[in-house]
Image (spheres, rainbow, N blue to C red):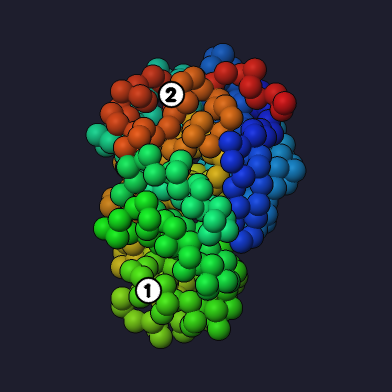
Amino acid sequence: MKIKHITVHRLRIPLRLRFEQSNNSTAISDSTVVEMTTTGGHVGYGESCPRPYVTGEDFNSVERDIQSMIAWLKNAEFQTIDDIRELATQELPRRIGLSAVCALELALLDALCKENNTTLAAALEIKLPERVEYSGVLPLRSPAGLEQLMSLVGRFGFRNLKLKVDSDLAANLARIEAVRATFPVEIPIRVDANCAWSREDALRQIPALSALGIQVFEQVFPKNADEEMARLQQHLGEQIFLMADESMTTKTSAERLIRQSACRRFNLKVSKNGGLFNTLDLYGLARQNGIECQLGAHFGETCILTAAGIVLTAMAGPLTAVEGGLGTHLLEYDLCLPSMQFDEQARISRPSGLLSSPGLNVHIQSQLLVER
């Protein structure tokens, strides 16, 4: 397979409700979509969600990175999945950012499979699960606002939930009370501070929240506070799980966290961690060192990253939770019809049938790639 043309699109889709967390707030998605045409006339699509507060990338930097690689990619030839795996895990991370790597990798995989008239799952020699069960993710709201939101969220059969929190302990306790009014105590809740806490916040909040059954605390400190996180995890003992997200992007950062015993869980994201193969490598590294993983998602992901997430669940082993799959539950529109999203049981069932066409099996409505 040889590449003839590459176009980079910025996709900003209105959200049905404002998504807020302690380090970001928006009512519009922001994705980068790569449209890649082969000399054989097939078109592959890839997506990433660059976030400056995660990998330091935004759309402009991702576009520059991809543009810098176009001439090189046009001169290359991709015959096998392993060719793309080597490019994504070895060559590209030395040259460009992780979000750019992700978008290019997914577009190359989609295009190659279409050229070979095979599904990505078949090309990877994996069996997709019978169903994927998704976690609910509750944005940061006032306690009263969260109580109103629960009337919408409560119609889904989530078996676990993530709650975005801030540094206000009283408000966080009230938020958990609002969630518990809809979801029983049997449904585990984990909280995500998105870098918002100081050590004093953590020492005050974690005992109070753990008394309400919370055991998992995601990214409580800002990025690069690994030593502080390690001291906190040691202080908290085995009953509490600190999870790294923004502070765990590359293999180097993952190895540093493992070496310092700074956390007991990783939040993996296909976009954040540089595509399927790099994310899978991080999963393997984590499990070798006794760290559990969840598969996270950026708000505003379209069907491209949803399909990639389903594939990742089949490539990896056990995951503590899977986020994403929101489709038009959150987006005003998706790139494919019908939208790829979980049902009222918070599941995507029989994905092997859903992803049965060549490539990633996302039938993109190309007219929607023009920013509106």
Crowd around label 2: few <14 · some 14–19 · many ≥20 (10 Å): many
Is 357 positioned to the left or the right of 166 in the image?
left
Residue under the point 60% across and 52% down: 20
Residue 23 lies, in percent from the top left, at 64, 60
Residue under the point 54% across and 56% down: 144
Judging depth in this view, the residue of 254 and 151 nearest the camera is 151
**In the rendered view of the protein, which quadrant contains the C terminus?**
top right
Residue 312 lies, in percent from the top left, at 38, 42
Residue 305 lies, in percent from the top left, at 49, 37
Residue 184 lies, in percent from the top left, at 30, 56
Q: Mark 2 = which residue?
A: 361
Q: Is residue 371 above or below residue 172?
A: above
Q: Mark 1 = which residue?
A: 210
Image disc number at residue 82 = none
**Quadrant housing residue 102:** top right
Find numbered disc 2 in the image and state the secondary structure of the residue it sits on. Answer: loop
Residue under the point 60% across and 69% down: 196
Find numbered disc 1 in the image and state the secondary structure of the residue it sits on. Answer: helix
Circle 2: residue type: Asn
**Quadrant housing residue 155:** top left
Q: Is residue 221 visible?
A: no
CB atoms at circles 2 and 1 under 8 Å apart? no
Circle 1: residue type: Ser
